Amino acid sequence: VFPAAATPDEPWKSHGTPKRSMEPIPEDLAHLLEVEPGTGVLRRRRVMSPTTDDVPFDITDSWIHPDVVEEVPAVAETNTGPGGYLDRIEEAGHGPLTWKERTRARMPTSEEARLLRMPRTGMPVVELVRVGRSARTGDPVEVTCVVIPADKVELWSDLTRHETAQWPVSPVTPDV
């Protein structure tokens, strides 16, 4: 999944001040982080876009497991240094982290539509949810949810024919 307006080396900026707060984690994300729904979890929120764009491109919410926050208090700091909070988690012995990502389209919440300044009503968003797991324990250490207006997303996939496919194709003869 690639944002349509972004390239890998494009600089990004924050819209407003990134936020950190302890909040009850939503039920669908609680399951992925393997905590009880409503558990107080550190939420890091950023509303971002490429530096050339004045309209927010995405909302990124990262929910960091309470055990990790206790073990690695630096993840709750405003400035987590080079590599951000993910590097701090890896440096604490959980690296290298691995991720599994789910992509789906859905309708935005009213808060998401407001933060993203979505110009049209009825436009869906694409939601990417990544679950980061510790190399040491195999347990989830963070769940990140990225919400992007659907008109700013392009999906690309590399597809390969199965090795049993024959090329050139043999002529097909009808059964008689």
Image (cartoon, rainbow, N blue to C red):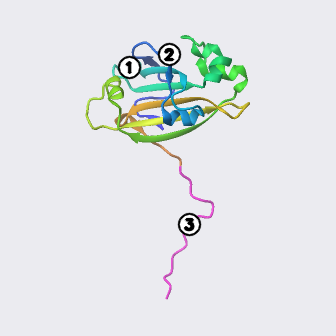
Q: Element under label 1?
A: loop
User: Disc 1 designates what residue?
Assistant: 52
Q: Amino acid at mark 3?
A: Pro
- Inspect the image, locate mark 1, and give the three-letter code of the amino acid beneath it: Thr
Residue drawn at x 72%, y 32% as measured from the top left = 137
Instruction: In the rendered structure, find residue 20 and report the number of the disc placed on it.
Output: 2
Magenta portion: prevailing SS class: loop
Q: Residue shown at 40%/14% (left/top)?
A: 16
Q: Which of pointers 3 and 1 lies earlier in the amino acid sequence?
A: 1
User: Regarding mark 3 in the picture, which secondary structure is present there?
Assistant: loop
Q: Which amino acid, mark 2?
A: Arg
From the image, state whether disc 2 or disc 1 is nearer to you. Answer: 2
Q: For mark 2, does the 10 Å Cα neighbourhood hold few (<14), some (14 to 19), or many (20 or more) residues?
A: some
Tell me how many marks there are.
Answer: 3
Magenta range is 159-176
Residue 168 marker: 3
Location of residue 72 (image quadrant): top right
> From mark 2 to mark 3, how far is it between C-alphas?
58 Å
Mark 2 or mark 1: which comes first in sequence? 2
Residue at 41%, 18% in the rendered image: 51
Task: Please identify, in this view, whether the residue under mark 3 or under mark 1 is nearer the observer.
Answer: 1
Would you call the spot at circle 3 few (<14 residues within 10 Å), some (14-19), or many (20 or more)?
few
| Residue 155, image x, y percentages | 45, 42
